[in-house]
Image (cartoon, rainbow, N blue to C red):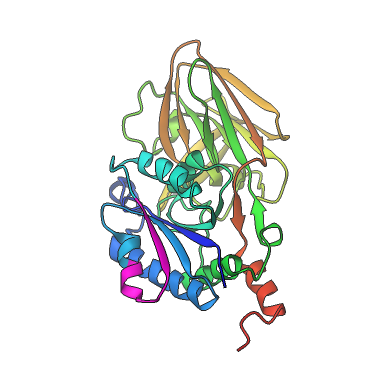
Amino acid sequence: MTTGTIGIVANPASGKDVRRLVARASVFDNREKCAIIRRALSGAINAGARRFAYLDDTHNIAGGALEELGYDCETVRVPCIGTNSALDTVRGASDLAQHDCVATLILGGDGTSRAFVKGWREAVMLPLSTGTNNVFPRVAEATIAGSALGVLAAGGVDLEEAAVPVKVIDVDIEGEAPDIALIDAVVTSDQFIGARALLDGDAIERIVLTRAEPTAVGMTSVGGLIRPLSEEEDAGLHLELGKGGRSKVHAPIAPGMFETLRIKRAETLGFEEVVAFEGPCVLAFDGEREREIQAGQQVRMRVSRSGPSVLDIARTMHLASCRNWFKQ
């Protein structure tokens, strides 16, 4: 039986940034990531998958996991360009697209998933949490996540019934390449990027969110604690912050780290409704500062459901079970 190809991406740098020093974020070492991939592969193979394409990395996380399993499977190594930056994931996603992966397992946080989408916007993803800000990735046992991937790859479910399109924030910057965020796009009063992590609440001037989660950490929690917005709702949330704000929220902007922020305004955004402003400022996407905006330079942000799709683990396994997929 011919099966579809499952992509694998493991970010060796995820779960190791400065927030381990200034906040209380957990550390995910690369041995644990390799173990997670081994469990996911076992689940996928048990469900019928036999073809894998993995993005190589400097620590051979995915490749090592495949070698240790010892199953008779078809594997393709996709070379990493070796910049030790997000560009490795961006380029790797673009290369994986050429291998017609039915879905891709991604180990990392929000930033890793964002980098992957920048390289392959139409991808079907199953992101598992091994980063710092973990709003977009799923928290799930890798064995079952892999089983869901295997069911999809082997034809137990159709893509249309198992994967859900997600919301994104498109960012247009005057005179420069556009950008994208999956969870939050933040405007700060900083003049330079400096340390990428967003840890100074006083510098935050504006937040655009695809979802506002009161049960998460990061910028999504700021909106979530005053006006919750789910992934399922066809809308975004726009917050204006600053000293003139009449209300305050004490939010966990990083694991174990709270900041008090003043809220001037909170408004729901319809799809394609534009938030426009100009520099000088720094833009942060999904928890990390990325772009410096010059004085007078125009920026436009809008939320839509035109991003990638994410495999629904529970729905996939439910459908497979109802169809007797796992019966011997």
Residue at the bottom extreme? 328
Q: Which quadrant holds the C terminus?
A: bottom right
Q: Is residue 100 above or below residue 81?
A: below
98 and 93: which one is in front? 98
299 and 325: which one is in front? 325
**Which percent across, then down, holds residue 47?**
55, 76
The answer to which image quadrant residue 275 occupies is: top right
Q: Is residue 188 left or right of residue 314?
A: left
Residue at the front extreme? 1
Q: Residue at x 70, y 28 (%)?
A: 273
The answer to which image quadrant residue 172 occupies is: top right
Q: Residue at x 40, y 35 (%)?
A: 200
Q: Residue at x 66, y 75 (%)?
A: 320
**Which percent across, then down, holds residue 57?**
31, 52
Q: Residue at x 65, y 35 (%)?
A: 303
**Which percent across, then down, holds residue 197?**
37, 39
Q: How many marks?
A: 0
**Which percent across, then down, holds residue 252?**
47, 48
Q: Is residue 317 visible?
A: yes
Q: Is residue 225 visible?
A: no
Q: Is residue 175 left or right of residue 38?
A: right
Magenta span contains residue 27: no
Q: Is residue 292 above or below residue 77?
A: above
Q: Which quadrant holds the N terminus?
A: bottom right
Magenta-colored span:
65-78
